[in-house]
Amino acid sequence: MPRVKRGVNAIKKRRTIMKLAKGYRGARHKKIKAAREAVMHALNYAYRDRRAKKREFRALWIARINAGTRLHDLSYSRFIEGLTKAGVTVNRKMLSELAIHDAAAFGEYVKLAKQNLPALAPA
């Protein structure tokens, strides 16, 4: 069986890790063992947080829409129910932007939602 020398591949792998660890503090940017650990954690966090970011933004949009609808004496859930029944397909991101920057247009959406809500039965 012929001898296999793997030095080139090993150095290439280490160089890749060290490039990714550029800018880290202390041993994390100098020593391969510490750098590899730091890079693996960083990549895992990046992967996880790319997904978490979507959830966080949706929660932010909902909070902003809720604040806007409360000014018109309506809750977020009733607002969304009214829009759904009206057949409006504006996403939460755009509704949030309207609530912040264009109160008049947002008020029209609230009015439309209120028109399509069933009257609440007295308790």
Image (cartoon, rainbow, N blue to C red):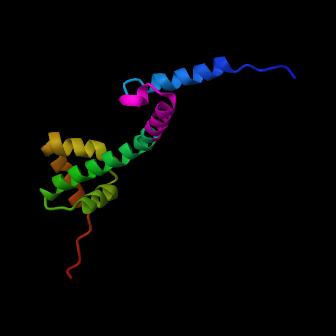
Q: Quadrant of the N terminus?
A: top right
Q: Residue furthest top?
A: 8
- The answer to which quarter of the image holds residue 120 is bottom left
Which residues make up the magenta segment? 25-44
Q: Residue furthest bottom?
A: 123
Q: Does residue 100 sit above or below 2 in this rendering?
A: below
107 on left or right of 80: left
Name the spot of residue 14 as percent of width and height, x first: 55, 24
120 on left or right of 26: left
Q: Residue at x 30, y 60 (%)?
A: 81
Q: Residue at x 24, y 45 (%)?
A: 96
Q: Give yes or no for residue 66 being in the magenta stretch.
A: no
Name the spot of residue 19 as percent of width and height, x first: 47, 22
By secondary structure, the bulk of the magenta-drawn segment is best described as: helix
Q: Residue at x 13, y 61 (%)?
A: 73
99 on left or right of 90: left
Name the spot of residue 105 as percent of width and height, x first: 17, 44
Q: Residue at x 47, y 33 (%)?
A: 34
Q: Does residue 8 sit above or below 51 in this rendering?
A: above
Q: Quadrant of the C terminus?
A: bottom left
Q: Give yes or no for residue 26 being in the magenta stretch.
A: yes
Name the spot of residue 26 as percent of width and height, x first: 37, 29
Q: Is residue 83 visible?
A: yes
- The answer to which quarter of the image holds residue 74 is bottom left
Quick one: 122 or 38, which is closer to the camera?
Answer: 38
How many dots with numbers?
A: 0
Q: Residue furthest right?
A: 1
Q: Is residue 90 visible?
A: no
Quick one: 85 or 80, which is closer to the camera?
Answer: 80
